[in-house]
Image (cartoon, rainbow, N blue to C red):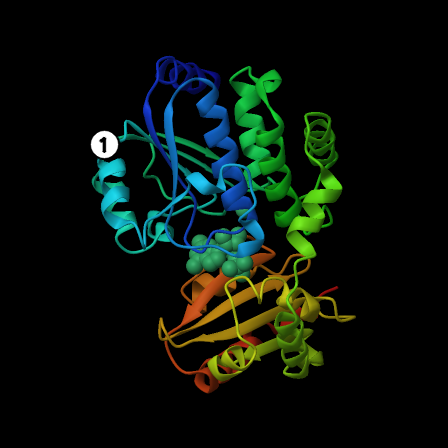
Amino acid sequence: MIKAQISEIKALLNSPKQIVIVPHKNPDGDAMGSTLALYHYLKIFNHKAVVIAPNDYPDFLKWLPGDDTVLKFESQQEDSKALIERAELIFTLDFNALHRAGEGMAEAIDRSKATKLMIDHHQQPDDYASFTYSDVSMSSTCEMVYNFIEMLGDIDKINTSIATCLYVGIMTDTGSFRFPATTSRTHQIIGDLIEKGADNSQIHNNIYDTNSYSRLQLLGRAMQNLRVIPELRTAYITLSQAELDEFNFKKGDTEGFVNYALSLKGIIFATIFIENHADSIIKISLRSKGEFSVNEFSRAHFNGGGHTNAAGGRSDTDMQSTIDKFISILPQYKQELSQK
Ligand code: 5GP
Ligand code: MN
């Protein structure tokens, strides 16, 4: 984002505006952290800001400061549509293509005459916004919102609520500061956020130590379903709808499961296939280590995308044919997958 654009954005934010802030569908910690942080920041300047999430998100995010103000498009369509139509500015955070806001909401944003601003770290961003702050090297959109506030000259305005929300997104998107996109700058920002009031230990506790018994049982089943293809350094997990039902699945329960597959010694590509009867799809999460791009893999074969080492995707066929397809494609990548 260049200086001239920052001056334009400053001018836009100079007087109170009607602002809508949007995370991607099935929001994660970075999506909710970044949108709520921006919400708290804009409130300081008396903007009429609101976060509208495309749909619901896991309970472990529902303690975030400002959570009670979030609208959900899926269940509050009329109010949401009116706010989007009336908005003067729409920020879209943590996604790179409007369709990631989900059916109905993407079209409403597209129709709106508001000035659109994108802040995002996913690869290959679409060009729908008047202002695009895209940086695929960033650990998280939350790190970018910190930078954005800094570019606007307002680092000293970061309060405990903003700091807490930003901490959550950086922590969750970096796997607690261990993925390669975590830099010394990321740690410096985290240090500053703690100084500004983020309670690091409490935040870890709120996000990670809220397991239900049934979630741990579901994890046990997922681990039993883990399969390994050692010659291609690949591991995958399946969970059927029946298994999800058996363990009383709730949104967010499978978050992080795929990382266990990736933690196997020697494995550099891991996926989890999760059946979703309601949407008639198999939801796929893909993770890798090193150069192998799950973004490219998912774009090419499973209607998705994301980052080099973390992406999502979907399949519209049943579990068995999805797995068959996956296994039949893999040998094409033999060379990349056998590299150190
Ligand atoms: P997850 O596996 O946790 O759903 O997603 C991993 C990463 O890929 C996240 O950063 C998420 O935002 C992104 N992602 C998930 N699904 C899609 C998709 O269908 N398209 C794109 N472009 N990104 C996705
Ligand atoms: Mn993110």
Q: Is residue 9 visible?
A: yes
- Kindly identify the amino acid type of the residue bearing the numbered disc 1: Arg
Towards the viewer: 263 or 291 = 263
Towards the viewer: 119 or 154 = 154
Q: Which quarter of the picture shows residue 217?
A: bottom right
Q: Residue at x 57, y 37 (%)?
A: 142
Q: Residue 246 in the image: x percent, y percent?
A: 54, 82
Q: Residue at x 73, y 26 (%)?
A: 195
Q: Relative to residue 235, is residue 250 drawn left or right? A: left
Q: Badge 1: how crowded within 10 Å, few (<14), some, or many (20+)?
A: some
Q: Residue 48 in the image: x percent, y percent?
A: 35, 26
Q: Residue at x 75, y 43 (%)?
A: 201
- Counting every numbered tag in the picture gives 1
Q: Relative to residue 203, is residue 108 drawn left or right? A: left
Q: Which quarter of the picture shows residue 247?
A: bottom right
- Secondary structure beneath dot 1 equals helix
Q: Is residue 180 visible?
A: no
Whether ligand 1 has any atom under 8 Å from the Cβ at mark 1 is answered as no
Q: Residue 138 in the image: x percent, y percent?
A: 59, 39
Query: As displayed, is residue 170 above or below residue 241?
Result: above
Q: Relative to residue 322, is residue 200 drawn left or right? A: right
- What residue is shown with label 1? 86
| Residue that sits furthest to the right in the current view | 265
Q: Relative to residue 88, is residue 329 drawn left or right? A: right
Towards the viewer: 160 or 5 = 160
Q: Residue 212 in the image: x percent, y percent?
A: 64, 67
Q: Quadrant of the C terminus?
A: bottom right
Towards the viewer: 1 or 193 = 193
Query: As displayed, is residue 222 above or below residue 120?
Result: below
